[in-house]
Amino acid sequence: MTEKQQHDVEQGAVFAPKFDSSGLLSAVAVDVETQQVLMVAFMDSEALAKTRASGLAHFHSRSRGRLWLKGESSGNVLKVEEIRIDCDQDAIVLMVRPAGPACHTGERSCFYRRIEGDRLQRLPD
Amino acid sequence: MTEKQQHDVEQGAVFAPKFDSSGLLSAVAVDVETQQVLMVAFMDSEALAKTRASGLAHFHSRSRGRLWLKGESSGNVLKVEEIRIDCDQDAIVLMVRPAGPACHTGERSCFYRRIEGDRLQRLPD
């Protein structure tokens, strides 16, 4: 990439998502009301396209090797209000309204514990 | 993994970070004051250990293939106040106090643009 191209990607208005060698980029879902990070996953170009077309967060499951509509079994979908992209366009933040707990454990966010020495401690609600 | 082991990882107090086949997990830096997502990167076990030992965010650069102290050249380090981990322990949220702009472009956050059709639009400060 030339310096001009790099500048356009990093500071311009050109949308040029950069998928990694596995075809993925990182995606972080953030609650648009509370600003809380709800979950972190991966998207391939199909998941990104489906998310944009449907307004519901879709991801690529690396363990299952397939497209995944978040909430497809639980009903706890994430309605996407805005998609933000980082400087080098290899990570995305979805600003979402969750239909229910984002975590399959029933917690509002998957990040409900903090590391405390060699143990994990539950955060206050 | 047995159901019991999975339950301990996902809902218990056992710290058992799950690095992927490349030895990495996703790491999101969040401003502890504003709750803003500042950047998304990857950590290997070395980066996680250095982060915990120093209190400054370290990552693994996939492009450079090496450990990277965030701010090592710019001085814009991220002081880590808390480390949160998700249910299946393959992603981490660092709650940080940034010493300066987190983005190399000089923006406070790397996520300073939103996708708008086929273009990117700068978010208000």
Image (spheres, coloured by chain):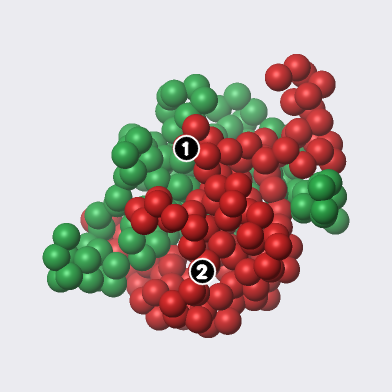
Chain colours: A red, B green
Sequence-first disc among 1 and 2 = 1
Can you say whether B60 is above or below B108 in the image?
above
Give me the chain letter of mark 2. A
Give me the chain letter of mark 1. A
Q: What residue is at 75 percent from the left and 49 percent from the top? A: B112
Q: Indicate the position of residue B97 as horizontal and vertical percent values.
A: 58, 51
Left or right of B43 on screen, residue B121: right
Q: What residue is at 45 percent from the left and 47 percent from the top? A: B26
Secondary element under disc 1, as helix, strand or loop, is loop
> Circle 2 sits on which residue?
A70
Q: Quadrant of the N terminus of chain B?
A: bottom left
Where residue A98 sits, quadrant-wise, is bottom right
Q: What residue is at 65 percent from the left and 73 percent from the top? A: A79
Can you say whether B4 is above or below A7 in the image?
below
> Circle 1 sits on which residue?
A22
Can you say whether B22 is above or below A32 in the image?
above
Q: Quadrant of the C terminus of chain B?
A: bottom right
